[in-house]
Amino acid sequence: MNNPVVAAKFEVDLTRYLDPTGKLLQELPKDTQDPATLTSLLCALVRTRAFDAKSVALQRTGRLGTYASSIGQEAVSVGAASAMRSDDILVPSFREHGGQLWRGATPVELFLYWGGDERGNFFANAPHDFPNCVPVGSHALHAAGVALAIKLRKEPRAVVCIFGDGATSKGDVYEAMNFAGAWKLPVIFVISNNQWSISVPRTSQSAAQTLAQKAIAAGIPGEQVDGNDVIAVRAVVGVALERARAGQGSCVVEALTYRLGDHTTSDDASRYRRDDEVTPHWQEEPIRRLQQYLTTARLWTKSDEDKLLKEVNAEIETAAEAYLATPSQDPSVMFDYTYAQLPVDLAAQKRAVLSSLSVNLPQTAE
Amino acid sequence: MSETTLVQAVNLALARAMAEDERVIILGEDVGIDGGVFRATDGLFARFGADRVRDTPLSEMGIGGISVGLAAAGFKPVAEIQFSGFIFPLIDQINNHASRFRARTRGHLQCPMIVRTPCGGGVHAPEHHSESPESMFTNIPGLRVIIPSSPRRAYGLLLAAIRGLDPVVFMEPTKLYRGAREEMLDDGKELPVDRCFVLREGCDVTLVAWGAMIPEALKTAEEWEVKSVSAEVIDVATLKPLDAETIINSVKKTGRCVIVHEAPLTGGFGGEIAARVAEGAFSSLLAPIERVTGYDTIMPLLKLENVYLPDAARIGKAVDRAMAYA
């Protein structure tokens, strides 16, 4: 074309309130000015890190299964969850312990899941939240489906779906964004961009300048936020949620953070990532900057810190003991929830388990 | 009373399910104003509106995943996948999510969703429009796999599937959409989803089939009756979970078993039925179990599809082989 015209133009904003040293860059959002709110966010970050540390310790001593630590990226899920109302719905992937704990999942429930007990996939205090989703990105569509259910019932609720940078390379994530745009669904997609999908860095994942801009193709707003700034995550997701609840549709929030640990306890990041790449990111992690801001603002003292650590560690230790003392499920339970009612065929297999704990008995023998 | 075709029966069941339960939502490509490419959802958009009869973006995995979310949040989505050749992007959602939700939450969440799709060959359709992928689904715990072979069974089984609480892949034989017709009542009565249907009683051989192979099996049974061979015909219809008992009891009576399906031989669901019969009726068998199936080839295009698809003559040869044993 000789005289091309600009058919469309887009920008991607990046929001940040606290710099890595804890310096306030702009006035705090209205609903985060209360000191009690600010300290509760710090408590949640510290509690998440304590939960992560205990989980890794339990795994290393053979008392938990493979575990995905969220160290360094706690502010993404805590910030997003703190912007939600209790009747909103969280649809997480598998590294959102902070958000789950904020919303009322108990450490015992989370230990149970990671320890290999399905009972940890339901949260009594957050009964509408979805369990973890392991197949990467496939839950983005569930979030869109739940959002459609909310919209059809005309409820003033919204859904928050969290997934990682790797998930944005998947078709199902794009399909979910596209549905959310086409049907104006009340769902917020939060990309917890921790820069690594196991061993593949963000730069190898996509040529896109930002991951937030993937929203633009779906016709929904996309923006970035400093994912190590819990105040910023809370503010940006909060605004998006208000729009969604008011019927104005979906949004993609790319939270920039960093995976300070291994992908999971089965991973050894030193095989593909140099320590000197990781070290500078410890200067940007979310807990220190909020702590420093609160200390400077005279809202937090060393004794507050000591008290918090003592409380949190005691809570997590008690939860770990309760988890370890939880009797296993009856083996036959695995048959009971496969179908709404136990089919005849499966009942025979269940009987075999009950009689001998062996599923290899002939099931239809004469 | 006028006759109803299988696709009309599907339409009647969908309309009744939507009228009796407002949680039932239809979604898929062209299911709205167009009424679906086979007209299975004809008239439903006008009657129930765009909220409940939803044209989706062209997005099969999306249809699957949205249905999982809808179902887990209390709705009863009935998704249509235009042709079974396009169902594969959904397998992730069906296998990893829909079929597992109840078990992995120990009953707290469940996923009562239906995925309807045409299946099978014999209508000279384009590439990817004639396959029979049922055995891709029968290995998935927690899922129901249903394939009706008549208008009444399509109606009664689809109603039961929608009223139930389990995820279901409901495969509708394209060849029978208008090829199968019978008088039937739109009476809201469902059929059991845990029993095979014995369509014809016999004492010499058991023909086990489903979908568009049922008319072929019935034809063989009639033709071989003239040769004094009495064939029992069982429509499996609800493949998963399998009612093995009805099949085993039949073979105990007849001593011979011929299994017929359109899908390829290797890994086909006929292998599972053969194993069950061998386990359950071994001492009654008078002949090796026969399988008459599609070949282990790519489904040919329309010029060769009738070479690929089993028919009454091929089934008859298998019956002859079985009868020759004793």
Image: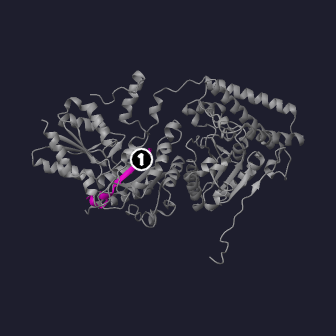
Q: Position of residue B74 (x, y in %)?
A: 52, 48
Disc 1 marks which residue? Answer: B168
Residue A127 vertical position relative to residue A156 in the rendered view, above or below: above
Q: Which residue is painted at 52% across and 37% down in the image? A: B104
Q: Which residues are magenta?
A: B165-182
Q: Which residue is painted at 87% across and 39% down in the image? A: A295
The answer to whether residue A117 is left or right of residue B273 is right
Q: Which residue is situated farthest in the left direction here?
A: B227
**Quadrant including the N terminus of chain B:** bottom left
**Quadrant including the C terminus of chain B:** top left
Q: Is residue A226 visible?
A: yes
Magenta residue check for A67: no
Please give the count of numbered marks on the rendered protein: 1
Element class at badge 1: strand
Colour option used: one colour
The answer to whether residue A347 is left or right of residue A324 is left
Q: Position of residue A316 (x, y in %)?
A: 70, 28
Q: Front-most of A9 and B281?
A: A9
Magenta residue check for B178: yes
* Chain letter behind tag 1: B
The answer to whether residue A233 is left or right of residue B220 is right
Q: Position of residue B294 (x, y in %)?
A: 29, 49
Q: Which residue is painted at 85% across and 53% down in the image? A: A27
Q: Which residue is painted at 39% across and 22% down in the image? A: A355
Q: Is residue A157 visible?
A: no
Find residue B84 and report its image quarter. bottom left
Q: Amino acid at mark 1?
A: Val
Q: Front-most of A334 and B14?
A: A334
Q: Residues within 10 Å of mark 1 (few under 14, many from 20)?
A: many
Q: Position of residue A241 (x, y in %)?
A: 68, 53
